[in-house]
């Protein structure tokens, strides 16, 4: 996936399609990790979440995994080259993550870029990198179970996969079963919000006992 070719225009493409709706999903639960010391962000993009997170979690050391050097450059510009942040320009699927290290993980409209098989492997590896009782904040597109909301979501999601397949070479064709894969890796949802008739969700998951 060559997302870097869209980097200068990515925010404006997003605003044209959804206004500020995706930003609201990304920002909705950042205060839940205010006390975190080690945070992992995968697929940060252009730095909008990272900039908010630095204010929300001022004591945290943050590792950012992003495959696009162009997006990393934009994120640097938004965060002033903060010493709290370490950027790793790598494919998350092949990056070695240290075990039991992070007390918070963020993935914002990221897991939907992968096939079910790749998402399953990635989620398992991320779960191993989390400390017991760590939090996972995620925002994703979602398919409601039935009715017009499902048809509405299918139309939007199909259009987006087509666009990113043409523009960036994205290989994924449909949403992976993210909720199922998270549960299988020991995560449990503790907070949930949705918008746009269920097309977009934000959740907080916790690793560990109920």
Image (spheres, rainbow, N blue to C red):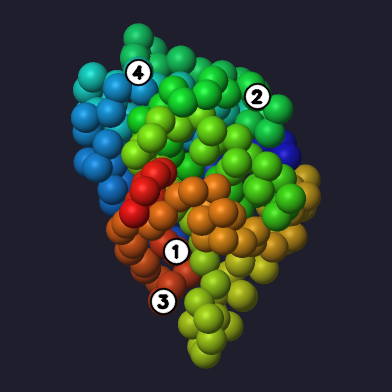
Observer-nearest of 141 and 165 = 141
Q: Residue furthest top?
A: 83
Q: Quadrant of residue 198?
A: bottom left
Badge 1 density bin: few <14, some 14–19, many ≥20, Cα 10 Å: many
Give residue 167's position: percent from left, percent from top: 72, 48
Residue in view at x 50 percent, y 18 percent: 87
Q: Which residue is mark 3?
A: 197
Give residue 76's position: percent from left, percent from top: 43, 19
From what the image shows, is residue 208 above or below residue 85? below
Marks 2, 1: nearer the viewer? 2
Residue 79 visible here:
no
From what the image shows, is residue 134 above or below residue 159? above
Residue 59 visible here:
yes
Mark 2 and mark 3 in contact? Answer it, CB < 8 Å.
Answer: no
From what the image shows, is residue 11 above or below residue 24? above
Q: Which numbered disc, 2 or 1, marks the residue that appears first in the sequence?
A: 2
Label 1 and label 4: CA atoms lie apart by 28 Å
Q: Which numbered disc, 1 or 4, marks the residue that appears first in the sequence?
A: 4
Residue in view at x 21 percent, y 30 percent: 35
Q: Which residue is mark 2?
A: 95
Observer-nearest of 69 and 32 = 32
Q: Secondary structure at mark 2?
A: loop
From what the image shows, is residue 98 above or below residue 49? above
Mark 3 and mark 4 in contact? Answer it, CB < 8 Å.
Answer: no
Residue in view at x 42 percent, y 62 percent: 201
Q: Residue furthest bottom?
A: 147
Q: Which numbered disc, 2 or 4, marks the residue that appears first in the sequence?
A: 4
Q: Which label is found at residue 200?
A: 1
Badge 3 density bin: few <14, some 14–19, many ≥20, Cα 10 Å: some
Q: Which numbered disc, 3 or 4, marks the residue that appears first in the sequence?
A: 4
Marks 2, 3: nearer the viewer? 2
């Amino acid at each position: 996936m060559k997302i870097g070719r869209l980097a200068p225009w990515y925010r404006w493409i997003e605003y044209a399609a959804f206004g500020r709706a995706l930003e609201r999903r990304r920002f909705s639960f950042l205060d839940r990790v205010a006390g975190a010391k080690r945070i992992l962000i995968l697929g940060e993009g252009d730095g909008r979440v990272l900039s908010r997170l630095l204010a929300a979690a001022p004591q945290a050391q943050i590792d950012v995994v992003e495959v696009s050097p162009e997006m990393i450059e934009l994120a640097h510009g938004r965060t002033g080259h903060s010493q709290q942040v370490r950027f790793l320009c790598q494919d998350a699927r092949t990056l070695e993550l240290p075990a039991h290290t992070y007390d918070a993980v963020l993935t914002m409209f990221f897991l939907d870029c992968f096939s079910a098989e790749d998402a399953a492997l990635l989620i398992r590896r991320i779960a191993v990198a989390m400390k017991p009782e760590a939090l996972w904040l995620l925002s994703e597109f979602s398919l409601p179970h039935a009715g017009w909301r499902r048809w509405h979501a299918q139309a939007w999601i199909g259009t987006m996969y087509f666009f990113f397949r043409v523009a960036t070479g994205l290989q994924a064709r449909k949403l992976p079963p993210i909720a199922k894969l998270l549960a299988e890796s020991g995560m449990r949802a503790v907070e949930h919000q949705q918008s746009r008739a269920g097309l977009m969700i934000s959740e907080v998951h916790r690793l560990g006992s109920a």
